[in-house]
Amino acid sequence: MTFSKHFKDLFKDVPEISYKGVDSKDPLSFRYYNPDQKVGDKTMAEHMRFAICYWHTLNWSGNDMFGSEIFSHPWLSNDISDIFEKAELKADHIFQMAQMMKIPFYAWHDRDVIAEGDTPKESVERLVKFSDYLLKKQEETGVKLLWGTANAFSNKRYSAGAGSNPNPEVFAFAASQVRTAMEVTHKLGGDNYVLWGGREGYDTLLNTNIAQEQDQLGKFMSLVVEHKHKIGFKGDILIEPKPKEPTKHQYDFDVATVYGFLKKYGLEKEIKVNIETNHAILAGHTMEHEIAMADALDIFGSIDINAGDYLLGWDTDQFPTDDLDMTKMMYYILKAGGLKKGGLNFDAKLRRQSCDVKDYLYAHVAGMDAGAHGLLSAHALLKDKVLDNFISERYKGWQSGFGKDILGGKLSLADIADKVENENINPQPVSGRQEMLEGMLNRYL
Ligand code: XLS
Ligand code: NI
Ligand code: NI
């Protein structure tokens, strides 16, 4: 696959991708996603806040661990030698794609936007200079920045991690990248700044001091937060949990682990999470578990929307097209109060065999539509309070009397035990009605 022409010219004969209603059989139309349609008090576009990502969309060449590249995009080849020309061409494409697919946001790593220079200073200057072009494209197209991040994992200097590296100079190099990436995100009006702990973990305990590495990471995050306030960036700082890959064990294992880490370093009010579906699965969780956990811990930020394959044990980053999965995801997003500064970033790549440029259109349209279907189903489920009513009934014992007194701290362990023994309390099991609830959920699809 290659882009023989600009994206918009390749598809100039494709009619505008628009909402055509549930009966539409056209794969380049939406059956559910109708951006201006109100769902509750927000439009669908406001609920979903979709973003297109630079890296899987334009940087990935289709290689996997057994196969070489099959997507030969012009900016990946050596035919264009001028770094800025390559960067412009790539930027033009990402904005054209976003516009064609009605995606209101985009997201990047520093190195996706423009290649690293020969020195740290040159790298910084390149990104800062090129960000004027991004700003111009944002103004021209109305596509906004959901988040920026720094790629502190691809270069060989990061083989043993960035902030958690045994060598302080590597920590420092990452600090240089993050400072600039965050300042550029701020300049471009980004809503969030993301830190995915690329190689912040270990391959073997035999050469690793976990306590030392955690303290380094705690320091790194504290410095990032301090700098955010110093430059007046009002967006959210987000950590993206992932349990493994590329390292055997990553420190930001899952939402609960990240929360423990934030608590330890006093950052739980400063940093939230960017939850990715495939990472949730790799951690042995479901996506809805991770969202519900983040909500319970009050650190829900944003979503990297994709799908994993339950039979393959790695981050396959597939496009999310399962309506039931999307319904569950959207339900817990709505329960968490919806996406505020966050969004649904397509951290997803085409399958290797989907090697036609048009597949980008099919993939995003299918993902957006499944998401919108999920939103509608989840909203109805929430509105009818199907699960809420059942759950409040299930826990009602804690709202008054004995239960309330226990939680309110009025009774000691001995008081509680005495009550059980004196009043002959002998509780019987109550049905949790799982199958009924699963059936009810399906009724809302
Ligand atoms: C990799 C991550 C990465 C982050 C951004 O698994 O998902 O793509 O989202 O660094
Ligand atoms: Ni991600
Ligand atoms: Ni990922």
Image (tube, rainbow, N blue to C red):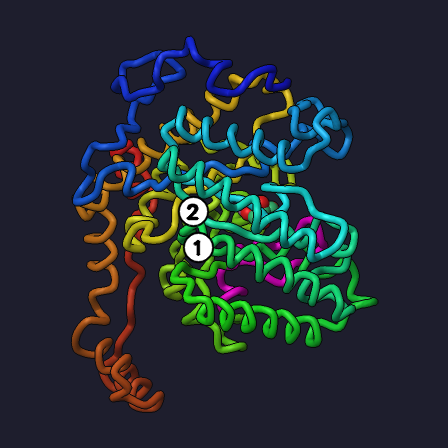
Q: Amino acid at mark 2?
A: Leu
Q: Is residue 85 left or right of residue 11?
A: right
Q: Residue at x 50, y 32 (%)?
A: 94
Earlier residue among tags 2 and 1: 2
Q: Which residues are magenta?
A: 239-259
Q: Residue at x 53, y 64 (%)?
A: 258
Above or below 404: residue 131: above
Q: Which residue is mark 1?
A: 192
> Image quadrant for the C terminus?
top left
Q: Is residue 223 left or right of residue 392?
A: right
Q: Which residue is mark 2?
A: 146
In front: 329, or 444? Answer: 329
Percent across and percent down for residue 246 are 70, 49
Label 2 close to label 1 by CB (< 8 Å): yes
Report whether residue 93 is seen.
Answer: yes
Q: Is mark 2 within 8 Å of ligand 1?
A: no
In front: 292, or 202? Answer: 202
Percent across and percent down for residue 45 are 29, 37
Q: Residues within 10 Å of mark 1 (few under 14, many from 20)?
A: many
> Image quadrant for the N terminus?
top right
Instruction: Tell me, for residue 259, which label it has, or none.
Output: none
Q: Quote the CA–CA distance across marks 2 and 1.
A: 6 Å
Q: Residues within 10 Å of mark 2 (few under 14, many from 20)?
A: many
Q: What element does badge 2 sit on?
A: strand
Q: Is residue 251 magenta?
A: yes
Percent across and percent down for residue 248 are 72, 54
- Residue placed farthest to the top in the image? 13
Q: Amino acid at mark 1?
A: Asn
